[in-house]
Image: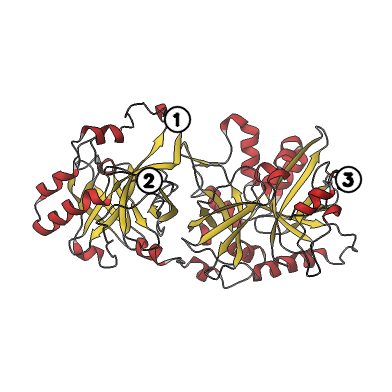
């Protein structure tokens, strides 16, 4: 059978409340889930909380029988057979929905049928790769809202690296060797997994909010990045919410076939006070190799994997731009002269602070050539390095015509993580569409976070540079940032001035990057009448 998304739920005895989350059915009898499934129980039971604390890192631990027994229920879709559709009047969708409540008319119309079965917690393990990530590159991240309290934050910290295995009860006889049975289930699951490739299309199937109304909901996007210890973290711009934890992340191949690559572990998170618009997942191949103690795989897993051609091109043209305490992104526009384009606010501390240009292959000092005045449109800057330093890179091709509304684009940059967090980090990519376009501003629906400023907006799938990312929309007082509402400078603004500068080496030609049109200035300040409520 193919792995599929399921809903896992249980009732908390003391409150009689039902709690649900997503899971992944990896075989007929086994469900893989994330440790956050146990959060409500961990908050109410010190004994259950101690289980997570006492788990040995990297060791598959059978659920001891003396611990409190939890009755889980697993709801999954029943697929149609070759002889016809499943008998939907025999369906039971949780909770309190029985076959008597399903009219014949409803049965005839509904193409989906679900079956609910009992399950028990059979085993758990604390993934060492997630432990290392949590203590390392994710140490500045939070995975719960501060308003939920310190106890919930502590429970999240303990359960974040934990993965669970549930055994579905089918009335079959107990295995004489349950440890071997569950290891075999994981080994067979490992055979059908696919490694994630940046830029590859993904689908998340899950149950938002753990509510059966939303069971098997679909979210689509791309693999934005693969990073962390042994490439165990999967970042995607496919949108997920609370309750999607444990849901499978499928990667799609050109043939249309899809395969599980990971599961959701954090649909909602914060980094340095900023809500993260990406969904965080675990890449299962390296994690299962560790728990099954399969040798000789880590070297291959550390090699970067590439997706579509445009992603390969962006990897060789997009760089981290550091100046002072912060960082942003930049893009190589002319390899022969070592000329990079970035945002003025990224290098606002120059020339008093040193500029460093780097990516996974090199690091060198940059020289500021020009930047637009502070808080003036357009927010652009030119930085140069010695041409021999960029021998391994390639420059982008700048568009000469304005891209159109609804066209697909891909953005790339270095949000959330910089080269100091991950020396070999590659750009994070996100795919979307042009939301709105004018002579002075390009708006996209791509997921953009702080650190991406100065990165490229490229046409999909051709890769032609159509804009430079500047900023997101934020609420008044910068209390909230909206990752999928962002603004960029169209390439038609800077293409000709940069070409003139490269042809003449006359810096004065770059002064045309500063805009003096009052209406465009107002647009960039978001204060065209009527005022935007941001």
Nearer the camera: disc 1 or disc 3: 3
Q: Which residue is mark 1?
A: 479
Whether residue 224 is visible to the viewer of this picture, yes or no, is yes
What is the quadrant of the C terminus in the image? Answer: top left
Along the viewing direction, whichever of 12 and 500 lies nearer the viewer:
500
Q: Position of residue 76 (x, y in %)?
A: 75, 55
Q: Count the marks: how many?
A: 3
Q: Quadrant of residue 291?
A: bottom right
What is the quadrant of the N terminus in the image? Answer: bottom right
Marks 3 and 1: in contact by CB < 8 Å? no
Local crowd size for mark 1, using a 10 Å CA cut-off: few (<14), some (14–19), many (≥20): few
Number of the label disc, if any, that sits on residue 100? 3
Q: Position of residue 200 (x, y in %)?
A: 49, 62
Q: Which residue occupies 29% across, 43% down?
A: 346
Label 1 SS? loop
Marks 1 and 2: in contact by CB < 8 Å? no
């Amino acid at each position: 059978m193919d792995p599929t998304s399921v809903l896992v739920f249980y009732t908390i005895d003391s409150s009689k409340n039902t709690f649900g989350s997503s899971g992944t059915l990896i075989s007929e009898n086994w469900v893989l889930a994330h440790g956050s499934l146990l959060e409500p129980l961990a908050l109410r039971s010190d004994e259950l909380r101690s289980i997570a604390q006492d788990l040995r890192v990297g060791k598959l631990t059978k659920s001891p029988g003396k611990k409190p027994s939890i009755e889980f229920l697993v709801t999954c879709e029943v697929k149609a057979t070759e002889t016809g559709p499943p008998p939907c009047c025999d369906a039971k969708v949780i909770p309190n929905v029985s076959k008597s409540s399903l009219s014949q008319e409803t049965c005839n119309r509904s193409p989906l049928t679900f079956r609910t079965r009992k399950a028990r917690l059979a085993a758990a393990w604390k993934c060492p790769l997630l432990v290392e990530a949590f203590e390392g590159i994710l140490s500045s991240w939070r995975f719960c809202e501060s308003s939920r309290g310190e106890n919930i934050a502590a429970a999240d910290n303990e359960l974040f690296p934990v993965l669970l295995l549930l055994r579905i009860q089918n009335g079959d006889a107990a295995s004489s060797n349950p440890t071997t049975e569950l290891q075999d289930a994981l080994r067979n699951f490992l055979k059908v997994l696919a490694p994630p490739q940046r830029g590859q299309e993904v689908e998340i199937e899950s149950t938002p909010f753990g509510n059966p109304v939303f069971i098997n909901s679909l979210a689509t996007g791309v693999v934005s990045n693969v990073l962390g210890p042994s490439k165990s973290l999967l970042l995607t711009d496919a949108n997920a919410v609370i309750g999607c934890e444990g849901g499978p992340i499928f990667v799609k191949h050109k043939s249309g076939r899809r395969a599980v690559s990971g599961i959701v572990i954090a649909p909602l998170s914060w980094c340095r006070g900023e809500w993260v618009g990406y969904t965080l997942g675990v890449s299962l191949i390296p994690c299962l190799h560790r728990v099954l103690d399969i040798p000789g795989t880590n070297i291959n897993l550390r090699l970067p994997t590439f997706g579509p051609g445009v992603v390969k091109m962006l990897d060789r043209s997009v760089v981290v731009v550091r100046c002072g305490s912060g960082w942003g992104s930049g893009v190589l526009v002319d390899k022969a002269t070592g000329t990079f384009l970035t945002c003025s606010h990224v290098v606002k501390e120059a020339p008093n602070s040193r500029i460093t240009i780097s990516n996974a292959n090199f690091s060198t000092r940059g020289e500021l050539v020009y930047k637009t005045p502070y808080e003036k449109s357009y927010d652009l800057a030119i930085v140069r390095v010695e041409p021999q330093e960029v021998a391994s890179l390639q420059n982008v091709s700048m568009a000469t015509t304005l891209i159109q509304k609804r066209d697909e684009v891909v953005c790339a940059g270095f949000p959330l993580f910089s080269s100091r967090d991950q020396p070999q980090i590659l750009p994070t990519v996100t795919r979307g569409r042009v939301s709105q376009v004018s002579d002075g501003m390009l708006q996209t629906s791509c997921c953009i976070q702080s650190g991406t400023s100065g990165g490229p907006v490229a046409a999909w799938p051709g890769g032609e540079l159509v804009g430079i990312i500047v900023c997101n929309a934020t609420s008044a007082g910068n209390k909230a940032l909206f990752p999928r509402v962002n603004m960029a400078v169209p390439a038609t603004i800077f293409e000709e001035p940069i070409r003139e500068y490269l042809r003449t080496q006359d810096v004065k030609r770059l002064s045309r990057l500063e805009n003096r049109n009052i209406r465009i200035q107002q647009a960039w300040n978001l204060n065209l009448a009527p005022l935007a409520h941001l």
